[in-house]
Image (tube, rainbow, N blue to C red):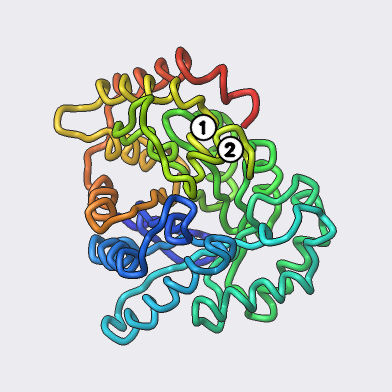
Amino acid sequence: MEQRAFDRLGRRVSVVGLGTWQLGGDWGEVSEDAAREVLNASVEAGVTFLDTADVYGDGRSERLIGGFLRDLRRERPEAEVLVATKMGRRVEQLPEHYTLDNFRAWTDRSRANLGVDRLDLVQLHCPPAAVIDSDAVFDALDTLVAEERVAGYGVSVETCDEALAAIARPGVASLQIILNPFRLKPLERVLPAAEEAGVGVIVRVPLASGLLSGRYTESTVFAESDHRSYNRHGEAFDQGETFSGVDFATGVAAAAEFATLLPEGVSPAAGALRWAIQQPGVTSVIPGARSAEQAAANAAAAALPPLDEPTLAAVRDLYDRRVRAQVHHRW
């Protein structure tokens, strides 16, 4: 699989990675065996980038990855996998909690969960905007690097304004942001700014929480433990994380139209991933997967030819007509 650079980390990662929120349980129950199958299938398909967070299942996702990495090092010592985790969402979202002492404690816990001496990449997990504006926060992150607790740090954000503020920080190695055919605003300023600054861009929610897979109808029911049931209106966290902030009925209809825009033989999920991969400035796209088959199919999108200009224009038109009014002003 094509590998792209995190310039400020001096590392390269696969253009399709694996997001592991679902391994923590907020997408319905995923067994340990199923999680291991997903991780194995991803790496077998060429994935070299895993994204997790300390809050996913309160550490379950990290611990599952840690066990997988121990076995991988023993069975395939030549395999190189970069693991990014995130911190900050296990406490109330107040700027005063983003301190060096807390950063040390949080990263120590993640290092133990993952079974590593040094984290490859730690990201602030959608912190309050005031955190990104704090010099002291980034001094503390620099200290983590100096103490070799982490190799580098980044910021995961909700809004484009937050993204631009993070990119302006000279030590930031990566930016994580929602980008998909239902969320185009980052194309305007964020991706060009990141590319110019040498900041890697990690694309999350590339399938709009599964909407762009084309598998759902207005009558689809999700498990009570699935955030697509309990967070549709932002009841638990930012609404933009669930279906990219698009009303479900609107999203289902728009996804059905999206499927008709793609070349023959290209599935909606693969088409959405291919769309994200080819946006200038993108480093890696991190869809989730609940089965080995899903993981392999996601990885295979990296080998598809780029979508042509008429298709890209049709995607833009679909966004403008059906989605823009719901999401563009907020994120």
Q: Residue 68, position in %: x, y?
A: 37, 75
Identify the residue under disc 2. Answer: 190
Q: Please give the name of the residue rendered at 58% of the width and 38% of the height, measured from the top-left corner.
A: 190
Q: Please give the name of the residue rendered at 33% of the width and 54% of the height, measured from the top-left corner.
A: 290
- Residue 87's quadrant in the figure? bottom right
**Considering depth in this image, is 161 or 9 the residue closer to the camera?**
161
Count of picture labels: 2
Say what secondary structure mark 2 lies in.
Answer: helix
Distance in Å between CA atoms under marks 1 and 2: 6 Å
Q: Please give the name of the residue rendered at 31% of the width and 83% of the height, measured from the top-left corner.
A: 77
Q: Quadrant of the N terminus?
A: bottom left
| Residue 26 placement, left or right of 216 | right
- Residue 236's quadrant in the figure? top right
**Which residue of the protein is positioned furthest toward the bottom in this rendering?**
74
**Considering depth in this image, is 141 or 103 the residue closer to the camera?**
103
Q: Residue 107, position in %: x, y?
A: 64, 73
Relative to 46, say whether 303 is above or below: above
Please say whether residue 58 is visible from this viewpoint. Answer: yes
Q: Quadrant of the C terminus?
A: top right
Circles 1 and 2 in contact, beta carbons < 8 Å: yes
Q: Residue 153, position in %: x, y?
A: 62, 63
Q: Residue 284, position in %: x, y?
A: 42, 51
Please say whether residue 203 is visible from this viewpoint. Answer: no
Looking at the rendered structure, the kind of residue marked 2 is Val
Assess disc 2: are there few (<14), some (14-19) or many (≥20) residues with their C-alpha within 10 Å of its C-alpha. Answer: many
Identify the residue under disc 1. Answer: 187
Looking at the rendered structure, the kind of residue marked 1 is Leu
